[in-house]
Image (tube, rainbow, N blue to C red):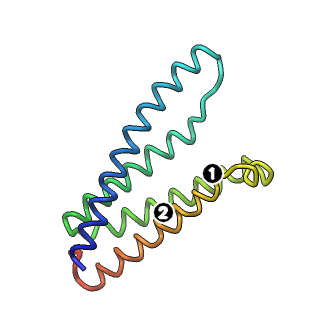
Amino acid sequence: MTVLVAALGLFYSIAGSVVLWRVRREWLLDRAIESLALQEPDRLRIAFMAVSALLYAAAGFALLLFSRWAVALLGAGLLVQGLYYAVNGRLAGRAARAASGQWGSAWNAAVMSAAAFAFAAYAHRLGLLV
């Protein structure tokens, strides 16, 4: 079980770092596109990506340290993810959601985040996360 906790922590710490790198790159590209095309970038998506990446990377590091804070950080990441999808879903409308394949991958990410949260809570209950 400790190997699974460490593997999950390694996965989330690497994934969070990669997403933070992507956020930085997109933020720089959005600033360039905004100045060239005079078009407003999707700042809500970039802010969501930054906040969720920070939460999930911190949760990954907490899992690597076998800290109980991993449960709270994974729960906060899941909450932020749910709020973003609720707000973005209302803004996009049903037709845009149905036409976009993004919502299928968003659902998969939400299920995986919920599973990681449940696993971390179970590990905490077993006494592995202190």
Which structural element holds mark 2? Answer: helix
Residue at horizontal 32%, vertical 60%? Answer: 59
Count of numbered badges drawn on the protein: 2
What is the spatial separation of the Cα atoms under label 1 and label 2, in whole angstroms? 18 Å
Left or right: 122 as drawn, with respect to 30 = left
Which structural element holds mark 1? Answer: helix
Decide: few, some or many residues near mark 1? Use Cα within 10 Å; few <14, some 14-19, many ≥20.
few
Q: Nearer the viewer, mark 1 or mark 2?
A: 1
Left or right: 17 as drawn, with respect to 103 = left
Q: Is residue 26 above or below residue 93?
A: above
Left or right: 99 as drawn, with respect to 68 = right
Q: Is residue 73 above or below residue 34?
A: below
Q: Position of residue 83 (x, y in %)?
A: 58, 57
Q: In this orientation, which residue lies closer to the viewer: 13 or 75?
A: 13
Locate the C terminus by quadrant.
bottom left
Type of the residue with mark 1:
Gln
Q: Position of residue 111 (x, y in %)?
A: 52, 68
Residue at horizontal 58%, vertical 57%? Answer: 106
For disc 2, the marked residue is 78
- Tell me, for residue 102, which label it has, or none: 1
| Quadrant assignment, res 9 | bottom left
Residue at horizontal 63%, vertical 51%? Answer: 102
Type of the residue with mark 2:
Leu
Toward the bottom, the furthest residue is 126
